[in-house]
Image (spheres, rainbow, N blue to C red):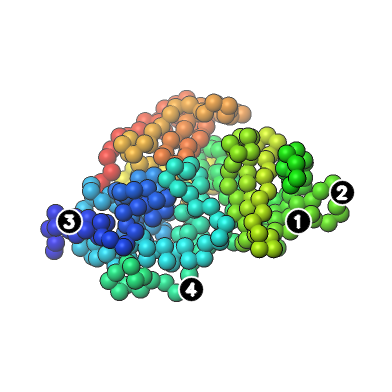
Amino acid sequence: MVEPDFSKTLLLEVLRAAGTGNAQCADCGTADPEWASYKLGIFICLNCSGIHRNLPEITRVKSIHLDFWENDLVEFMKTHGNLCAKAKYEAKVPPFYYIPHSKDCLVLKEQWIRAKYEREEFVATSVCHETGSSGDCLWRVFSLVRPKSQELQSCVCQPDAEASAGSREGFLWKRGRDSRQFLKRRFLLSATEGVLKYYTKESKGPKAVISVKDLNAMFQTEKIRNPHGLQITYSKEGQTRNLFVFHESGKHKEAFKKRWFSLDSQERNLFYFKDPLDAFELGRVFIGSKEQGYEVQADLPRGVTGKRWKAGLTIVTPHRKFVFVCENDREQKEWTAALNEVISQPLTA
């Protein structure tokens, strides 16, 4: 049995050890991370820890300073670390893939974290072995996704994001290669072929066929001067090629979907089901504390309205908002009170 203070001292030594990469968040590079995933053996920042909490089957987090650390967990962190995880989970990142930084939005960070640990899109065939030193040790750039369905018992919720299979086709405004004029072009993203194609009005066949594994995409609202601007980068004949596109409106309306919710206040999880008798959950939302930036708002975001049900409810987390509508004001008040009770309680080890 190790004394808590001594165990914490050992953990801080691992955090500060030279040549481990532990002094920056393993996912976004933020300096002096204060959280860690004891299942992956990495040190992460507060914002990224909130994303990790939504992947309980893959990663579990603890506060470096506030939580108790058992000796075996400290040893696990010592034999792994950020550089070891990087060697495994980032071994095959495409050369043009945009890796989010500390100042990037949480949507990009979440997709990056899910790509690395949930989908394991860049994993090396050989992994880091526990030798005592961490120093030894189709990415979906176009996941045109929509939010996954959340719910509150007999409430209806706004859908959340799931990648669609098959193909995605539509029109985007593309900047001409030799001019500043944007022209309307048809784009086709084929998951079965693993390619992105676009067509001009004159051409019968595609103007370009781009392999998804060779491209990267990032939001470029300022550069393109459009709130829905996107830069697509890929390699063509040994040279880097950029496409600048934007959607005409960027608006994508989704109907609210009825889901059944169950709140586990002890584990701080809001589970949702398609039917109240379903054997398995569709998903869950982790409910953190007020100190971490979680809150409940008894209304809907500006511009969002329900059709039949008008009693809105918004759960605000450090990395996104979950929007719901309840059948009546009474249920809205009951859910708001129940969620606020959980949020008001500090996190425990």
Depth check: 63 or 22 in front? 22
The residue beneath circle 2 is 202
71 left or right of 211?
left
Of circles 3 and 1, the one toward us is 1
Crowd rating for badge 3 (residues with CA inside 10 Å; few <14, some 14–19, many 20+): few
Depth check: 69 or 340 in front? 69
Choose the circle earlier in sequence order: 1 or 2.
2
What percent of the width, then of the height, locates residue 68? 21, 53
Choose the circle earlier in sequence order: 3 or 1.
3
Choose the circle earlier in sequence order: 4 or 2.
4
Quadrant of the drawing holding the N terminus = bottom left
Dot 1 and dot 4 residues touching (CB under 8 Å) = no
Dot 3 and dot 1 residues touching (CB under 8 Å) = no
Depth check: 84 or 69 in front? 84
45 left or right of 14?
right
Depth check: 86 or 62 in front? 86
Residue located 34% across and 39% down the image: 292
Rendered image: mark on residue 125: 4
Rendered image: mark on residue 9: 3
Q: Amino acid at mark 1?
A: Ala
Could you say whether the residue bearing mark 1 is in a helix, strand or loop? strand
What percent of the width, then of the height, locates residue 312? 50, 28
Could you tell me how far apart the alpha carbons at marks 1 and 2 are, in whole angstroms? 13 Å
Residue located 37% across and 48% down the image: 30
